[in-house]
Image (cartoon, rainbow, N blue to C red):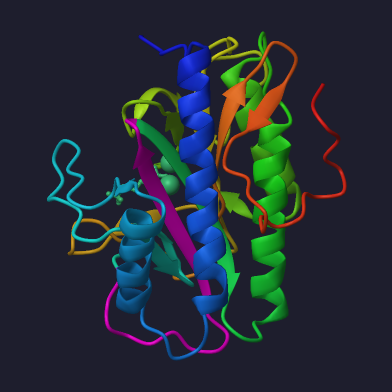
Amino acid sequence: MTITIKDSAGMDGMRVAGRLAAELLDYLAPLVKPGITTNELDRLAEDYTTKVLHAISAPLNYAPGGHNPYPKSICTSINHQVCHGIPNDKPLKRGDIVNVDVTVIKDGWHGDSSRMYMVGDVSVAAKRLCNLTYEAMWKGIMKVREGAYLGDIGYAIQTFAEGHGLSVVREFCGHGIGEKFHEEPQVLHYGKPGTLELLKAGMTITIEPMLNVGRKEIKELGDGWTIVTKDHSLSAQWEHTVLVTPTGYEVLTLSANSPALPAFVTPSA
Ligand code: MF3
Ligand code: CO
Ligand code: CO
């Protein structure tokens, strides 16, 4: 197991990349409206990344082992789509919930973040799922500090999610991140306290729980990327890139218009 530890230059590189990913999500927020297609969002995101952020979209042509190259610059996962939805020409409609997942590369460093967007008025159940998934991510983030275990993060997320009647997707997880998009370790969103890898200051990881209203099982569509819930129940996801510090965590993918933190989040020392 080789987990990279960022030195102070690496941490600064990750801070910049993380902020730019968040700024891209800020830019997209007001554009996610009924009638826009996810292909239009993809095009706008690609232009903003290259022309305004002077950065690179990591997903475009990304081809981890066994996968055909990812064809777009962002992932857009709607309603029962869990993750890795591929933008297309279908317009968004009122009531949809959409996860937009962006990863930018700046000066060789990766910043990875996703948010849920609600298209017009959405159902109470959809709104509850989006809000609880956001809180579940933060429950995990709050466990991060040097000397904590990865299992502490997974346990915090799983107990919170299941305590609210939601299920945790098992097949996809958070990850180390740095000069590579996906590094070790895997960051599971379920587990037992005091198990798995011990966190050390200077590690950078993502926490990105996918929670379903129905059962946890998923399946992959024929495009080789899009993941949906097997029972077609609604699914939501949020993602931050986080730096492990000696006393806690530093969330790297924050920006001026990041959603407010849940009330239970107390500043990390
Ligand atoms: N951004 C996703 C993650 O959080 C990975 C997307 S891979 C892609 O890890 F190829 F689908 F873009
Ligand atoms: Co990620
Ligand atoms: Co992501």
Residue 190 visible, this angle: yes
Residue 85 visible, this angle: no
Of 30 and 222, which appears nearest the observer?
Answer: 30
Residue sitting at 75 percent across and 14 percent down? 247
Give the vertical position of 150 relative to 246 (above or below): below
Give the vertical position of 238 relative to 11 (above or below): below
Residue sitting at 52 percent across and 65 percent down? 27
**Magenta stretch containing residue 70, yes or no?**
no
Is 158 left or right of 186, judged from the image as shown?
A: right
Locate the N terminus and report the quarter of the image it occupies.
Answer: top left
**Residue 95, percent from left and from top:** 58, 85
Q: Which quadrant of the render holds ligand 2?
A: top left
Is 2 left or right of 239, judged from the image as shown?
A: left
Which residues fall within the magenta stretch? 87-108
Of 22 and 227, which appears nearest the observer?
Answer: 22
**Magenta stretch containing residue 96, yes or no?**
yes
Locate the C terminus and report the quarter of the image it occupies.
Answer: top right
Residue sitting at 58 percent across and 9 percent down? 200
Residue sitting at 72 percent across and 78 percent down? 124
**Residue 143, percent from left and from top:** 71, 26
**Residue 160, percent from left and from top:** 73, 43
Residue 87, quarter of the rendered image? bottom left
